[in-house]
Image (tube, grey):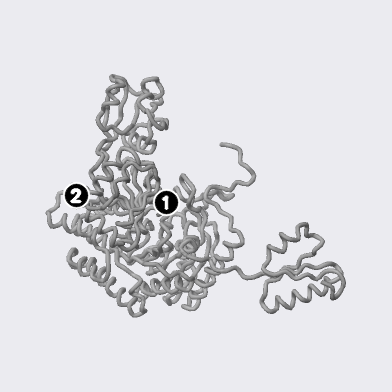
Amino acid sequence: MSRLFMFEKPLGMRDTLPELYEAKDRVRSAIEKEMKQWGFRFIETPALEYYETVGSASAILDQQLFKLLDQQGHTLVLRPDMTAPIARLAASKLFKDEVPLRLAYSANVYRAQQREGGRPAEFEQIGVECIGDDSVSADGEMIALAISALKKAGLQQFQLSVGHVGFVKELFVQILGTEDRARELTKFLYEKNYVGYREHVKSLPLSSIDSQRLLAFLELRGGPEVIGKASELVENGKGKDALDELKQLWDVIDDFGESGKIKFDLTIVSHMSYYTGILFEVYAGMVGFPIGNGGRYDQLLEKFGKSTGATGFAIRIDRLLESLSSLGQPAPVTCILFSTERRKEAFQLAAERREDGEQVVLQDISAVRNLDACSNAYSDVVFLVGKEGAR
Amino acid sequence: MNGQQLTIAMPKGRIFDEAVELLRNAGFDLPPEFDDSRKLIIDVEEENFRFILAKPMDVATYVEHGVADLGIAGKDVLLEEERDVYELLDLKISGCYLAVAGLPDTKMNDVAPKIATKYPNIAAAYFREQGEQVEIIKLNGSIELAPLIGLADRIVDIVSTGRTLKENGLVEYETITTVTSRLIVNPVSYRIKDERISELIKRLNDVI
């Protein structure tokens, strides 16, 4: 390994400079406010968790986890997502009396980079979890809140694609007979390899009707008409139930007045293997990666000892910022340059202006080496130097 | 003008001509200077396309990061790079295959067999599946040299006619997989520009 220069940071780690910090802060506050107004309460959990518990429940690939050892020799992980820690907390403490629990967070999560930069290894997610509510209304609430929060953050053009992992699983098992064979085919969906999917389907000893059903599955993308097409592919039972849920979901979102923002895409399967039902991804133009995702995870809490349904979503602040056309104007800052003679006057003026909500810097002029550069750094400069009244 | 602009990453070199021909067959109106331009970015306003010309190995990278909506990339590149992109169509052009080759009648070193290749990930995965632990030596071209001068026991490389191997006195031992060019799409573009992309796929599908 080559010797590190003093300015270097680990791969994927980034500094946040004032302009970006302020832009992030504005976006975060807008979204936080919206989530609070929908009755979600913010919580924090530790950055470090046990590998055996949260680490293994989190569904992030093992090689993407940052691991370290504590003094007893337990393996720890830097939390790779927030859903698993919240499931731990809800199952062990907060979820009581079967009252649906609405929690929110904004926190940094950590996922190690395997080979190159261009993607952060530490990034902020802001999201919510609704625990103990297995109604489609809750799924709809997640999507409606995501839409509303993104609008409040200033994002104009975006789209949500909604799928259902239960439908995919049921359709594949119905046609292929066993869960193993269904998993094998699903792998092509995870890998987004449709060429391989079609080749695999053609190589299977299936009736031509069944092959056609599997090939037609890849085309299940679009508006509410997709549900009708999908229902021709699947037999009665759990697959149809899943489609019923999606149909109800459409009506729920329609009642929220936001069905224009969503499309169905039944080919979506997530690398987050804990999803069990409705799931969705959020896309915005100008950014090549989804800016958020969410869905129902009805079995995750069971791993932590409490069996109940849950759903939620997370938005990536970094990608959201990338997709916003403007980062907004930084607030103006006034600089009061003072000399010792008028120090008290300067302090009083600063206090008054701060009281009015302005941002004010107090700068002793004797410490300023380059007056022009200093003046240019602020939106307004007030000199309180020399004798009283002189300027 | 057709709605949103589509940016398509094209591989320079071997695959380029066949890819251009395929697009023309599908009825896309590409200007004649397209073929011998040295520009790296070519806008085709009639079709509302922007083409970027990239190294074949880099096409999937541009598409993954979303700076190109679509791309044409060899299956070899997709296997080696494992980028998070949709592989939507087998264009069935530039057919060739990945093979293991070496000097005739030789065995691999028992202790530490060495494999020279431009495709370290594919080579490592292939030999692992064969139950063999090998040492990979990454080269950037003229891979055939490696066994000739004793750098490696075997090479893993693309073979189209087999002439280069033959002229250098090498023989193929195993075929790893066949390779053709694929149409790849960025996951976000696939959803946001779905109508234009579906139309493009349909037109290409008709001429493959």
Q: Nearer the viewer, mark 2 or mark 1?
A: 2
Position of residue B38 relative to residue A380, above or below, is above
Query: The residue tagged with tag 1: helix, strand or loop?
Result: loop
Location of residue A4 (image quadrant): top right
Location of residue A292 (image quadrant): bottom left
Tag 1 subunit: A
Location of residue A371 (image quadrant): bottom right
Left or right: A261 in relation to A235: right
- Callouts 2 and 1 on one subunit: no
Q: What is the C-alpha distance between the residues marked 2 and 1?
A: 40 Å
Taking the image as drawn, is residue B22 in sight?
Answer: yes
Residue drawn at x 48%, y 52% as measured from the top left: A119
Query: The residue tagged with tag 2: helix, strand or loop?
Result: helix
Location of mark 1 (residue): A61
Taking the image as drawn, is residue B85 in sight?
Answer: no
Location of mark 2 (residue): B207
Q: Amino acid at mark 2?
A: Val
Position of residue A131 relative to residue B67, above or below, is below
Q: Position of residue A359 (x, y in %)?
A: 68, 71
Q: Position of residue B25 (x, y in %)?
A: 21, 49
Q: Nearer the viewer, residue B98 or A348?
A: A348
Left or right: B29 in relation to A116: left
Residue drawn at x 55%, y 61% as measured from the top left: A46
Mark 1, other Cα within 10 Å: few <14 / some 14–19 / many ≥20: some
Q: Amino acid at mark 1?
A: Leu
Q: Position of residue A42 (x, y in %)?
A: 52, 71
Mark 2, other Cα within 10 Å: few <14 / some 14–19 / many ≥20: few
